[in-house]
Image: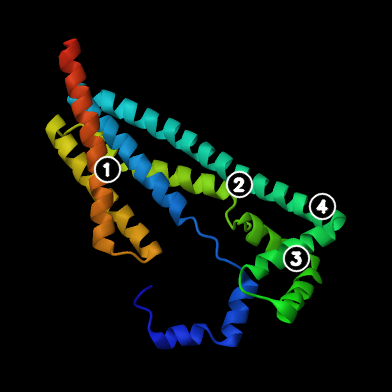
Amino acid sequence: MNNISKAKLVKEHQPEAVRKRLNHGPKRQNVSDAVLGGIDGCITTFAVVSGSLGAGFPSSVAVILGFANLFADGFSMAISNYESSKAEEEYFDSIKKSEERHIKEVPEGEREEIRQIFQAKGFEGELLEKVLDTITANKSVWLDVMLVEEHGLSRSTQKPSISAGVTFLAFVAVGAVPLLPYIVSSLETGQQFAASAFLAGVMFFLIGMLKSLALARPVLVSGIRTLLTGGTAAALAYFTAYFLREIFGVAAG
């Protein structure tokens, strides 16, 4: 995004282009849901794989625990995302209804709020009164201004069900990748873990790159940062399982 030429920026800010963009409304994006689900899914399953290795469990245990956690945690995370988005939506609606009532029952009080809001922005005198009259002449505009300026709210373009679905699909799709080598029975345990670690590393790096492209951040830095995050989580799982195995004297499978 930072590489967009000035000519393109100028073209995008011509009156007609601006009008079309504003009329179309804000774009819906689910990149954050996909990134969150993908990272968490990969961390969850690779942590299970690492923990199983550290505890000395056989490969079959890693597969069983990995897939069980994959679907259970993916569903749990999707539901949590849905409930969170739904709560934000319901909160917005409750504040909107409250402001609609205030505008209807105490319009002068609401006008005074608008006056003080724009007074704080530097408007005064006749210009302030003109701005006030213009905003309060349209109930829809008046309501939107109150929601944004007084409460810092704007309606989200996200749909809770879509956010939850994207989170679940990303969680399962990416989280399943580190488990793939364990399905191949011809590989030895060490080879399975090495292949799983490699695939998990690739997924972490790719997710980091996806995030950087969506947010116009340096691709390499974001990829490495996400890779380190996943690697740290896996290392914690491995050493925790290893030390607990030694403490409780559990024999490796």
Image x and y of residue 165, in percent:
52, 46
| Earlier sequence position, callout 4 versus callout 2 | 2
SS for dot 3: helix
Q: Point out the residue furthest to the front here.
A: 125
Under mark 1, the amino acid is Gly
Residue 2 in view: yes
Instruction: State the residue at coordinates (15%, 16%).
Output: 246
Image x and y of residue 227, in percent:
24, 49
Residue, disc 1: 230
Q: CA distance from mark 4 to mark 1?
A: 49 Å
Instruction: State the residue at coordinates (29%, 30%).
Output: 48
SS for dot 4: helix
Under mark 3, the amino acid is Trp
Residue, disc 3: 142
| Earlier sequence position, callout 2 versus callout 3 | 2
Quadrant occupied by the C terminus: top left
Mark identifier at residue 88: 2
SS for dot 1: helix
Under mark 4, the amino acid is Arg
Q: Mark 4 and 1 residues: CB-CB less than 8 Å, in contact? A: no
| Earlier sequence position, callout 3 versus callout 4 | 4
Q: In this rendering, would 122 be left or right of 169?
A: right
Using the rendered view, name the quadrant where residue 55 is placed: top left
Under mark 2, the amino acid is Glu
Image x and y of residue 179, in percent:
28, 37
| Earlier sequence position, callout 4 versus callout 1 | 4
